[in-house]
Amino acid sequence: MNILVTGGLGLIGHNVVTRLQQQGHTASVIDNRTTYGMIPPAELDYLIVERLKKIQLSPSHLYNRDICNKDSIDDIFEMEQPEVMIHMASFPRQKVVNANPAWGARVMMEGLINVLESAKKHHVKRVVYISSSMVYGDFTNDVTEDAVCRPQGQYGIMKLAGEDLVKDYTRRGCFDHAIIRPSAVYGPLDVEDRVVSKFMLTAMRGGVLRVNGAGETLDFTYVDDAADGIVAAALVPAAANQTFNITKSHSVSLLQAAEMIVKIVANGSIELRDKDADFPSRGALNIDRARAVLGYDPQIDVAEGFDNYHAWFKNSLYWAPKTI
């Protein structure tokens, strides 16, 4: 099958491409390699090189394009003629949107419309839209996909609006869809400025892990498990027009996560702070639907995932010298 992955050089994206290739599918990638004005260029350059080593994508299937450039994006659809599009090109989290909401809105709304219009024009059969657990707003454990969504902050609001846009194209008979709501994805080849990465590197440097809300929890999900769920949603016929929580379905408090990392690294200390008011309180998502429809079965628990991530950091030619 011919599958186009937008944002295919991102943390989750390059793992999705790897799995598609392993299963014999032809993958093409659109990724503009942006720093979002936040990622140090040297860090991003290192990550892109390492991610490309994993996917070994032919240059003819790799497009350094901005999804806000409508004509350029449409040219790619014309050349590639994908049967499925997995749409991951987006501002990645609330902090980045807060820093530049107008740019975020352009990418998350105008960019989304551009790829959906091209998908309609070129007869794509399925669009997989990567949303976020942030669409739920505040929630406790066992929240299902049918829960009422009350997003807090522009990132979650725009992700939910994106879901509705995708559904409207399906309503009009353009293509079927699958919507994915992941949570707190982490793992090797991620950027430093995420909670697990930041905790891990701070501990390795002997610094202070600042925990914003000791009782706040996240459904930490290892990147391999997230990628497996997304690929299944793209390929399983029964996934058509459904929404799936794709997580480990196990909540861990920020304090517990920090304590685990300090123990694994055998370094660092912890400072407790007040909850960050910009982020909703979250628990574990229910993944029964993904288990039943997709055969989704996340394998990596937090302890193993943190161990894997620490081992990767210790052996990284880029990061190891920066933790001394």
Image (tube, rainbow, N blue to C red):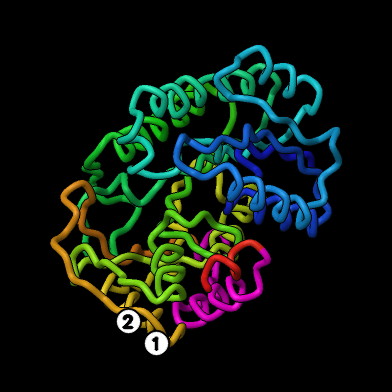
* Front one among 243 and 33: 33
Dominant secondary structure, magenta: helix
The stretch drawn in magenta includes residue 254: no
> Which amino acid type corresponds to the residue marked 2 in the rendered image?
Glu
Q: Disc 1, disc 2: CB below 8 Å?
A: yes
The stretch drawn in magenta includes residue 293: yes
Residue picked out by circle 2: 259
> Looking at the picture, how far across and down is residue 242, in whole percent?
47, 46
Residue picked out by circle 1: 263
> Looking at the picture, how far across and down is residue 163, in whole percent?
41, 35
> Looking at the picture, how far across and down is residue 213, in whole percent?
18, 65
> Looking at the picture, how far across and down is residue 97, in whole percent?
36, 35
Element at label 2: helix
**Alpha-carbon distance for marks 1 and 2?**
6 Å
The boundaries of the magenta stretch are 291-317
Residue 264: which quarter of the image? Answer: bottom left
- Asked if residue 311 is positioned above or below residue 235 in the image, the reply reads below
